[in-house]
Image: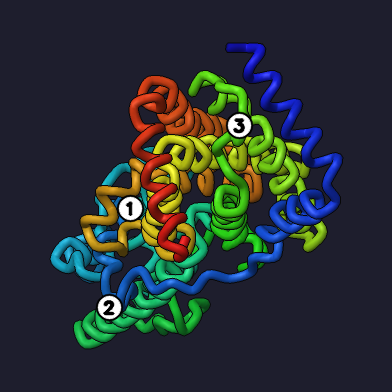
Amino acid sequence: MLKGINEIFRNDIKSIIRNPVVIIALIIIICLPSLYSLVNISAVWNPYNETGNMKVAIVDNDLGYTAGGVDYNFGKNLSDELAANNTDFNWQFVDENTARYGVNTGAYYAAFIIPSNFTENLLSFETVNPRQAQISYIVNDKLNPIAPRLTNVTADTLLSNINSAVDQAKINLTSGGNLNGISFTNGQSNNPVYLNSTVIDPVYNYGSAIAPFYISLSLFIGCIVAIAMLSTRVRSNKKYHHVSVYLGRMGLFLIISVFQALVIALGVLNLHIQVTSPYLFTLTALYIGLCFMVIAYSLTSIFGNMGKALVIILLVLQIMTTGGTFPVNLLPSTFQNLAPYLPMGYAIGALREVMAGVLWNSYWYNILVLAIFPTVIFVLTILIKERFSKPAEWTEEKLKKSGLF
């Protein structure tokens, strides 16, 4: 069997070297995916109306404050108001450590942290030394290119609502004669609350933010181009074992995948896309390309033309479920449930780590889960290829005789 594998692979290399037309065709196959620039498929309708599925953490540490004989707690008021309205976002009321860790790991898209002295500072306008209150707003740019834009708008809205509530409290205190002659504008800005924003793993331009999606998509399209133009069958007078055919021809496809990934990676780096390490980025792209190629090649090797159709269906499903543009939480529940069982989402996750700031636990998680897909299909192909080879060849022959395929 090993002899057959080696023989098939050497014959493939000889066929390439001896035929300039084949060389030109392979150059096209290798370079074409890198020219891919945009796929505009609408996976959802009105995604901004579905932000209620996005988890945003709320931390209320406010201890409240008594002014003019009245107890105030603006932090609690804000939390109660958000708890009564979960349509804007899926508010998660947690402690500060949970919130910060959740934003860092991707459990939450953002977090609002209300400090313990929030109300006290808000009502400090009635003192000699008024202080400006703040809410800490934490967002992770790396998680998704769209989500931070949505949460930023919400941050502005919350700020406006809080300022309106504070202004009303000032009016109430003034009417009650509790200001002792001190102007409530003394030393305090027109907006008494400001956001102390912290961006984790900042992404400096939209091109870098969206790049992991298009890189992964280009690598998968490269596999489709390869299986569309090259045969997974070995045409020879010599009879080879089905495993020898599968493994022997796989060598050529894997070599193509390596060159495709290199061309894509070098092209992206030439655009000065944000990356933490060009070497780790290139290695990750190579790894993703090899995983995708094993999947596409194996399906085609087992099922023939039907396998090619399955690969295209897989591509379409992944475009809709990867979270490469809009967050997965904005998709219909069917696609949300399907997303963990498709490989491209993990490829995008690994590339995001490399490009915007590596959290190694997350990086290796994506790398290892991605490996499961080609490993499973590789073993499956070894086990069932012989059983499906004859039906697949018979189907291909019938299609060929029709003059349409």
Find the distance from the CA under tag 2 to the CA under tag 3.
67 Å
17 vs 348: above or below: above
Find the distance from the CA under tag 3 to the CA under tag 1.
48 Å
Pointer 3: residues within 10 angstroms few (<14), some, or many (20+)? many
Residue beneath the point at 67% across and 26% down: 8
Q: Which corner quadrant of the image does residue 281 belong to?
A: top right
Residue at which label 1 appears: 57
Residue at which label 2 appears: 165
Pointer 1: residues within 10 angstroms few (<14), some, or many (20+)? many
Q: Which corner quadrant of the image does residue 160 belong to?
A: bottom left
- Relative image position of residue 151 (x, y in whole percent): 41, 67
What's the residue type where badge 3 is placed? Met
Residue at which label 3 appears: 250
- Relative image position of residue 365 (x, y in whole percent): 48, 31
Judge from the rendering whether residue 159 lies leftward or rightward of residue 232; answer left or right.
Answer: left
What's the residue type where badge 1 is placed? Ala
Where is the N terminus found, in terms of image quarters? top right
Residue beneath the point at 55% across and 37% down: 233
Q: Nearer the viewer, residue 3 or 316?
A: 3
Q: Nearer the viewer, residue 41 or 171?
A: 41
Q: Are marks 2 and 3 in contact (CB under 8 Å)?
A: no
Pointer 2: residues within 10 angstroms few (<14), some, or many (20+)? some
Element assignment for label 3: helix
Q: Nearer the viewer, residue 224 or 267?
A: 224
Residue beneath the point at 82% across and 59% down: 270
